[in-house]
Image (spheres, helix red, strand yellow):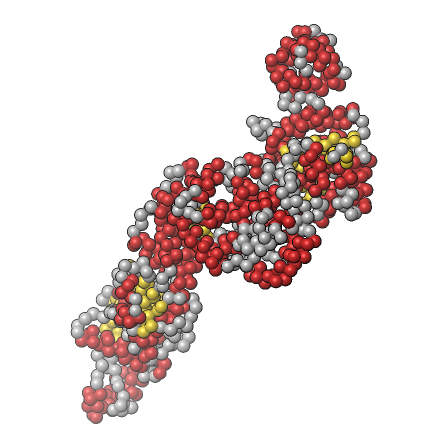
Amino acid sequence: MKIEQIFSKKLTRDINGVVKAEQKDNDSVYVELDEYVVTRELDRHFRAFFEAYVPSVTQSGASMSGKIGVWISGFFGSGKSHFLKILSYLLENKSVEKDGQGRQAFEFFKDKINDAMLLADIQNAVTKDTDVILFNIDSRANTDDRENAILKVFLKVFNERVGYCADFPHIAHLERELDKRNQYMSFKDKFAELTQSTWEKERDAYDFYRDELSEALAHASEQSLESAKAWVEQVENNFPLDIRNFCKWVNEYLDRTGDRNLLFLVDEVGQFIGKNTQMMLKLQTITEDLGTYCGGRAWVVVTSQADIDAAIGGMDKRDGEDFSKIQGRFSTRLQLSSSNTSEVIQKRLLSKTEEARTHLIDVFAEKGDILRNQLTFDKTTTASLKGYTDAPSFVDNYPFVPYHYTLVQKVFESIRTKGATGKHLAMGERSLLDAFQSAAKQMKDSGLDVLIPFYSFYAPIESFLEPAVKRTIDQACELDSLTEFDGKILKTLFLIRYVDVVKSTLDNLVTLSIDRIDADKIALRKQIEESLNRLERQLLIARNGDEYIFLTNEEKEIENEIRHTDVEMSEVSNKLSAIVFDGILKGNRAYRYPVNKQDFAVSRFCNGHPKDGTTLEDLVIKVISPLDSHFENYSHDQACINHTLEADGCVLVKLGEHKRLWDDLTTFIKTDRFLKQNSGQRPEQEHLLREKQMENIEREKRLRTDFEALFAEADVYAIGTKLPKKSATPSAIVEEAFKYVIENTFAKLNMLKATPGEVLRELQAVLVADDIAQIGLDLQADECNPEATREVEQYVTLKVERNEPVYLRDIVARFGKRPYGWPDNEILLLTARLGLAGKVSFSTQGTDLALKKAYEPFTSVRKRGEIRVHKIRQHDERQIKKVHRGFPGKAALIFRKKYSESLNPYAMRFITLILLFTPSSTLVCIG
């Protein structure tokens, strides 16, 4: 069984899939009425419309005046124009004929609508004489006067309907006035006598018949010829064009013609108005005044892609009264959705014979699981693009896939709004129904193992494309270096160029290109990948990350210039450095060791280039990549390990091979340079340059994400070891490496025990301690870090013995670096304790610095370079023992006798210490 044989109606029949408001020949109307599908959604919309409209059949006046506006919205291809046209047939109960048999529009719907009440409403509506004026406003408008365009079109189609001149409203006004005076026939007869032609035939060229016009007017109105000529000369200037006059003329017509209604059915008014708020207000006023003047007998029904709230969303909300008035004038609002489109196509085009249904059910039972796996999109897809859910879904949609409805509709919308098509597609001259029929006809001779590939939808719109776009694709398909399949992929990329619900990634292109139920996806993927490479080499497409973008001729020129933009490899390395260090690693120039909260400065290198100058800090990190000209020197682990042992050692991060990513980085830099060089230089290409800029911004974001993933997989080496991967994030990986370096190269780091609590508070307490605290200070106590204190004291002693000046800044620098790595504040505290114990003293600019005044300069990084540290001379134990043998008692008595009245507690304590002195004690000699 072939595709062509599975449908209940002939696939190749003329279905009049293109809906045109002006196409009203008998055969076209018959097909439209006969094949029109009333879906569940349309059934609701018919009910809503006729519930609003039927009261105007039996009543008029103020009760109906505010309810005569209907707003029908729906996306491009949703069927709103067709719905409007069918309404026009029903409201005037149009008669059509086939094979000599006549039928009225209402009769077609007796089998399409099951709701008896709705049918009764429709029948009630068609019993009243009704004039229906259906028109596409864009095709009837004169674009040289946008301010009055809406009113002029309404007046034009109204004049045409009642038999007056359509193109010249002032001539129509002349006809109207003559008609009111019962002089119109006399005027036309006289004009025909004078010109040997009819007035209707010649009135559009009235300027060539001014004399005859004047004479006929004088004859009919019984004026003098001079008066008639004067009137003709001023006919245009004296024409009173405004909305109230228009509505008054409509009302006069309805009064004159008896009990009837008049409906203006306006297609694509939303597209015509756009964001012109004045035109929207004019439409609102026309609708409001028609309701007021005509008492509900004249209706305005419009279609728009946007619903009314979106259409007026651009208005100035300060004018809230006008905003709410517009909403109020269109009280009946009908919105067509995508479900309506798919149901129409299924019932009108894809309805199957019983034999075909049975066969397709068997196919799905056998290959349903294969189909579910075949027709899947990647995770970048932003919409739920459905495949077949079950056997009925397969039968109803075959040979198409359910996601085709959404995608094709989006394609039509996008290429129309982006200007890739001419006016015909923009005005709805190509419908989704027609597109699906055309795609199916291409496969009509195939068996039931095929699926419709997405490139089949290119043919239905090909003739409506802008010549430049079509020429690009045609020329590409003729290149000897490309295959026929390459052309199909190019067409697919064009179709989804501006569609935001599916990304043009390799995986998605594979899914869109599947043309058989059990196609080999692996082989197809390879075939598409090869096609993409050929298309990219020919500059027909460009790759942006994982996406492949169709290029127009202008875009190709820009892409070619970007490719030939020269960049230095150092620029690429600098950008990589910025991405890695400023982006991925968050710009951190120091590492805080978690054990003692010490901050260690970091020197950063990328591909051999320093990020922060040439000075090496205690911690060094080097990132190398395939962009480094010496990258091959790091091909083996041992070479990397050896490099980390040079000088004081370093952390080495080796990024892996990823050609596409490195190409993207180069493309980013080339594009960035090209855009900067051409900023403001190409006004005619400004929109394309803006698109390139936005594309490059997204490329930079993607680069950071991709490099972050690459960094997480990188090999990391530190001071002679390849480190195991314990963390998943780059920051954590680097922190682990730094921690390893510190704990294996800072040998005396653990000599210092962290001070509990706040170190600066302890520092302040030591510096302001009283004499008793000073006397009681025991530097050998654990809380005083005796081992660390001795290190600091020995350093000061060594410097003094060499006659080298010692500044507080030197001490902090010395013990903050390898092999110590102590925190600055802890070093300050150790030094302060030495001062309190009388081991050292301090001065600034030659003046002694008392401990009680030392806190502020101690904690000022700048002032530490001004604080000089002096070693206080200490007496050793042998000297003290000699004094102790004969002097302590005598000295104490002398002190007491001479100073007993003035001795302060410190002196008393000093004397007591002398008396109690033991050989194991150390005595400070003061003064």
**Quarter location, residue 723:** bottom left
In the figure, residue 430 lies in which quadrant?
top right
Whether residue 660 is situated above or below residue 99 in the rendered picture = below
Does 696 sit left or right of 357 as displayed? left
Task: Give the image location of residue 825, x and y in percent.
Answer: 34, 71
Q: Residue at 27% across / 76% down in the picture?
A: 792
Name the foreground residue: 778 vs 913.
Answer: 778
| Whole-percent x, y for residue 124 in the image | 81, 38
Residue 577 vs residue 387, the one in the foreground: 387
Query: What percent of the width, then of the height, locates residue 529?
Result: 44, 54
| Left or right position of 225 against 653 | right
Q: Residue at x 40, y 45 (%)?
A: 480
Name which quarter of the figure residue 833 lies in. bottom left
Along the line of sight, the residue nearer the viewer: 348 or 320: 348
Residue 177, can we see it?
Answer: yes
Residue lying furthest front: 1
* Residue at 61 percent of width and 44 percent of height: 437
Q: As displayed, is residue 256 above or below residue 485?
A: above
Give the quadrant of the C terminus: bottom left
Q: Is residue 340 visible?
A: no
